[in-house]
Structure formats: structure tokens, C-alpha cells
Amino acid sequence: MPSLNPVILSLMLLALSPHQIIPASAKAKPARHKQAASPAAQAFDAGEYDQVIRLYQTARADGAQTPSTELSRLALRSYARLGRPEDAWPLYQQLIPDGSPDDLPLLREIAWATVTSRMRDPQEHIRLAAFAVVAESRMQDVGPLLEDSLLDPSVVIRAKAAEAIGRAKLTSRAGTLIRALDDRAPSVRIAAMTSLGELGVLSVRERLIEIARREEGPESVFAAGALIRLGREDMLADVLGAATYPDAEIRMAALGVLGRLKRPTTLSVLTQAVYDPDPSVRAFAAGALGEFGQKSGLSALTHALADEDARVRAIAATSAGRLGGPHIRSLLQPLLRDADDFVRASALEGLVRAGDQDVLLTAAHLAKHAAPQVRAAVAQSLAVNGYKQAIPLLEQLVRDPQPQPRLAAARALGHVGAPAAIPALKKALQDSEPAVRITAGGGLLRVIDRGRTRTS
């Protein structure tokens, strides 16, 4: 409720107590005019960020005065809006010295600029790092960025953009997905079909029926999967039939579709697939069982945990951790002594996901492995929401001499999601490798936004 004007309040009091004498201190004072906005504030509000920076630089050049806090803040935000986080960061350090409580809104602006300023970087791996952050973001304004990524020269980014639009339920972007059905890369077309099915875009049914009839490879299977989501239940028989095709790629496509559809009547097809003669199909089946999410698939995963192929064992360990259950620890603990380093890291991830709190010693041991990809796998295994105990180890890995573990550790710190991860992420925001800085920016966004959600 707005506060009452002092004059009106005085009259109301007089009306209630006509013989009361109002003290002089209670008499109405002339209303003060709102102070006019500074030139820098006016320029910022008008979107003239270059002008704000000029005003700041002029004030700095004038030896007789130092820029005000307001001007410094506006300059920082202007640098961020212009996609120049490397210029914004020194200002943040001036405004918020080490040991002071962070200004989370300012820090968030720098983090977002660190990500979005690299969305069109010439190097694919840097664009991919930026895109990965945007694709995971739950912000409402990421739609245009994902849509723009569908035009990226990288096939990987285009495919992941199509998938991200579906996962984010951005129905308003369905038109771009329909155009992606004509993409030259099969993986992009498949991702577009899957997302159109998940979004329930009925207008593409005839187009998908044509693809399902015309194509003979995995595309026809994914078209059938999208049609099932759009109400064509009869297409489920086609997907089940594809799971027994001689072609291993078609079998894998069918298992992938069934894993995402999560129809209880098809679980037996996935459980049988862990016995497939092709190790790639067995690995796909193990991953699909984790995606399916039914604890009744754990017996099949138990078989896969003893597979002769290391990749099958590793994926089965991660999937088993996703399913959870009272016996997970006894199933996965032996894999911590597996001959394959990546199987041990996957078993670690499975145990962490299952809530095992006693695996950090194994993680610390693996984190000293000579191979940087193994140290990165350890960091990835600790990327579980709320696993605060992992922060000290991830702080070590974010200072690793190799960029791969640093990138994985920065991502994991964001997924842990605890405010205690912010100091390490701030250090990673100054990393020499752009992809690590981008990933750290994404981690800060996750931590800050999660805190805002909890307090709102």
C-alpha cells in the first residue's frame, strides 16, 4: 500500500482529535522533487552503452576525481550488454573487493555476457561450449539464441539446438524445426523430428508419414517415434520391428526411441537388448534403460555391468545409478576396482547419483590420474545437484594444468548448485581457456538462478 501524504495524514489526525495540537515536527514539509537521473543513467536507459563507457573513461582520465560507484556500475553493465565481459570483470573486482559479499545481479550479468558473447565465435569448440550453457538454461529468452543456432555451420550444434528446443517445450519455435527437416545432415533432421513429436506439432504428421515410408535407415525409425507422440499408436509396431533388424544402427535407433517413449509394454525389448551380439547395441540398450527410468530394468543392467565391453559396463553403471535402489551400492562398488579407468569413473558417478556419500576417497585417487580425460571424467561424475561434499575436490580440478579437467570441473560446480561453489567459479571465469570461462559463466548462472528461485 502506498504511504499517505504528510498533509493528508495530519488532517486525518485532526479530524479524529480536534483538540489535539500537532507538534511542529509533524507539520507537512514541502515535497521534494525527484532527483534527475545522471547523464550516464539516462544513456544506459536509452541503450546508449557506448556513451556510458565514454563518460566513465572521461571520469577516469580526469585526475581530479574518480568515477562514482553509480557510474562504475553502469559502465560494468554497459560492457556486459556490449558483449565485453573481459572489460566488465576488472570493474567488478574494483566494486566488490575480495572478501566482500558478492553482488549477484552484477555477477550474473558478467556471466551471461561471457556466454552469449561467444555464440558466434569462429572456433567450433568455443561456440559449442556457449551453446551447451544456453541449451541447459531455463531462462525464457533463450528461444532466439537456440533458433539462431539452427543456422550454425556446425552439424553438432544444429542437431543439439533442435533437440534443446523440444526439451525446453518452445512450441513457438516449431516453424524453425519444420524447416530443419530439410537440413542436409541426417542427425539434424532426426533431432528436429523428435522435437516436433515432443512438442505435439500435428501439422507435420503427413510429412513424417512420408519420411517413415520413404527412408530405410534410422530416420524412418525416428519419424515413427515422432508419429507415436502425435497420436499414431499403430507406428509402435514399426519401432518394435526395427529393434530386431539386421542393421545395428536401426536397432540402436529403435532402442533410443523406446527409451524416450517409456511405454511399460516395451520394457522387455530393452532388457533383451543387453544380450545383443553387437557391443554398440548393448551399450545403447544400457543407456536406454537409464532413460526409461524403471527400476524393473535393473536386473538387465546387472547383467550389463559384467559385460566384456568396457563401454557397456560404463554406461550400465551410470544408468544403474540413475535408477537407484537399495542394492545399488553392492552392484557398483566392485566396479570401482575395474581394470578400465572410465568404468571406474562411471561407477563413481552411479554411486554419487544413488546417494552414496563414501566415494570421495576413490574420486580423489582417480583425480590424480595421469590422463587428463580420466580426471575430467571424475569431475563429470561429481556433477550432481546438492553434492556439496564434492566442492573441495572440484576446486582442485578447476585449477588442473590441462583445460579438459578444468572445463569438466567448472560444469560440475554449476550442477552441484551450491553458493559455496561461487568462489571457484569466479576464478574459473578468469581462466586462460575461453571454453572454461564460458562453462564457468554457465555454472554461475545455474547457482545464482537456483538461489533466486529458492528465495522467490
Image (cartoon, rainbow, N blue to C red):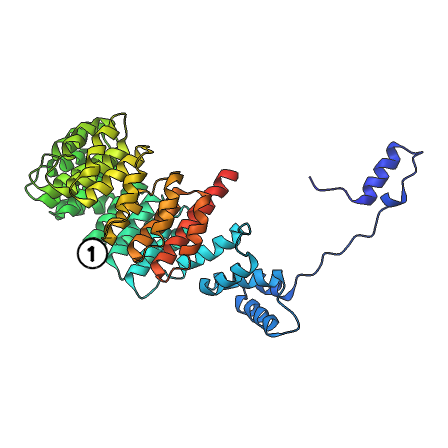
- Residue type, numbered disc 1: Ala
User: Could you tell me which residue is drawn at 86 percent across and 39 percent down?
Assistant: 11
Disc 1 crowd, CA 10 A, few/some/many (<14, 14-19, 20+)? some
Name the quadrant containing residue 6.
Answer: top right
Horizontal and vertical percent for residue 3? 73, 42
- Residue at the image point whose x is 90% and y is 45% from the top: 24
Along the line of sight, the residue nearer the viewer: 284 or 11: 284
> In this orientation, which residue lies closer to the viewer: 323 or 5?
323
Tag 1, which secondary structure? loop
Q: Position of residue 123 (x, y in %)?
A: 30, 64
Which residue position is annotated with label 1? Answer: 185
216 sits to left or right of 289: left
- Left of 8 or right of it: where is 48? left
Q: Is residue 171 visible?
A: no
Q: Is residue 197 left or right of residue 340?
A: right
The residue under the point 9% across, 44% down is 248
The N terminus lies in quadrant: top right
Residue 5 percent across, percent down from the top left: 78, 44
User: Considering only vertical position in the picture, is 150 above or below 390?
Assistant: below
Q: Does 155 appear above or below 378? A: below
